[in-house]
Amino acid sequence: MATAPARGKSATDKTVQRDIIAISDDIRQRHGWLKHQNAIGFGIFAIAIAGCTLNAVLYLQGLMPGWAVILLTAFWTSLLHELEHDLIHWMYFKNNKVVHHLMMLGVYLWRPTTINPWVRRHLHFHHHKHSGSETDLEERGITNGEKWGLKRLIMVGDNMLAVYLRAVKYLTEPVRLYRRGVIDRKDLKNFRLIGLVSYNPLGVIVHAIWHFFVVYHLLNGAAWLAGSSIPWPEVVSAQLSWITPLVVVLIAPNMLRTFCLHFISSNMHYYGDNEPGKITEQCQVLNVWWLWPLQAFCFNFGSTHAIHHFVVRDPFYVRQMTAKRAHEVLRENGVRFNDLGTFRRANRMHEKPQAA
């Protein structure tokens, strides 16, 4: 993109990177099995998909209640999200493109409410270079920088409603950035292309099924409260025979996982007044105790994602192993912990924009 290049790393950023890499190297040396990165990644991939499949089979056979399926599958898909993130950074099977892209396809099909991962790769690399900027579409897409309220809460949990509720902005924002010289004509075309293909066709179809399911039951609930019922055409009611199982075994777990992940991620990243290229100002560590129910369905993302901003090379399970010692390094070098004021400040680091 034509965005102004991010500034070079500060001395503090380099110190943090050096110290966390040293911690990671120490852990890798003490745990020789970590060198089998491809095998570990594929093993987690296979176990997570097997877990999702087993949950679905048990539900369809009447051996597992729907609520248990939703919770357990949400956990398994949180592992698939972490794998997708690692795959985006080419951490598994970099030299075997067939297996690599099959894994990308697998994590996509089991998380069909997400952006196409091949599109997300482009967005994510840009996010690392320009985190917190106007062109950071990955984080802005999940409400980073928006004022908190009911609208943002809804958008955090439903990617497609986030598109619908900001339809005008999706059309006008790229043009505004182009006119200001923040992006060039090629970027303007790419922004529109990204908007067109990110959720098409899989995400659009799956969200349409989800919205039908939710609206159907909301209307029935409202009618019941009013002491009435809705005479749905048979063709409408008949769809529930396949939609309900699909929602339980696949869509609802992903909606739960999405809400948990996006709530954490959209509140831990700073936006708007962070210094370009300064990694210590890109995000905080968000691991306050009352967020643990959400962390359980995004694999402790709030506690470890800041580590990833400094050291990209480590897969998610290594970040978990380094977290305790890495947190000490982050804290000593000014990275914020549990800065809950960001809810009030719409992700800004400061109460008011810093004077130029």
Image (cartoon, rainbow, N blue to C red):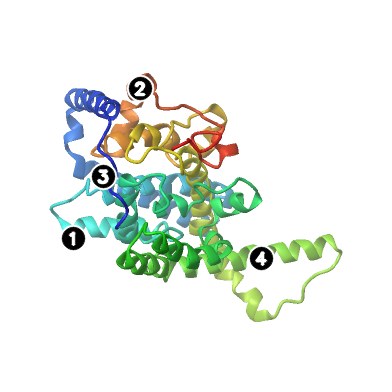
Label pair 2/4, CB-CB below 8 angstroms: no
Answer few, some or many: residues within 10 Å of disc 4's Cα (few below 14, many 20 plus, some between 14 and 19): few
Disc 1 element: helix
Answer few, some or many: residues within 10 Å of disc 3's Cα (few below 14, many 20 plus, some between 14 and 19): many
Mark 3 = which residue?
41
Q: Is 31 on the left-hand or right-hand side of 294?
A: left
Label pair 2/1, CB-CB below 8 angstroms: no
| First of labels 4, 3 by sequence position | 3
| First of labels 2, 4 by sequence position | 4
Answer few, some or many: residues within 10 Å of disc 2's Cα (few below 14, many 20 plus, some between 14 and 19): some
Q: Tell me, for residue 333, which label it has, or none.
A: 2
The mark closer to the camera, 4 or 3, is 4
Q: Is 25 on the left-hand or right-hand side of 350?
A: left
Q: Is residue 61 visible?
A: no
Mark 4 = which residue?
215
Mark 1 = which residue?
98
Disc 4 element: helix
Which amino acid is tagged 4? Val
The mark closer to the camera, 2 or 3, is 2
For marks 4 and 1, give the CA distance. Answer: 40 Å
For marks 2 and 1, give the CA distance. Answer: 41 Å
Residue at image coords 56%, 34%: 351
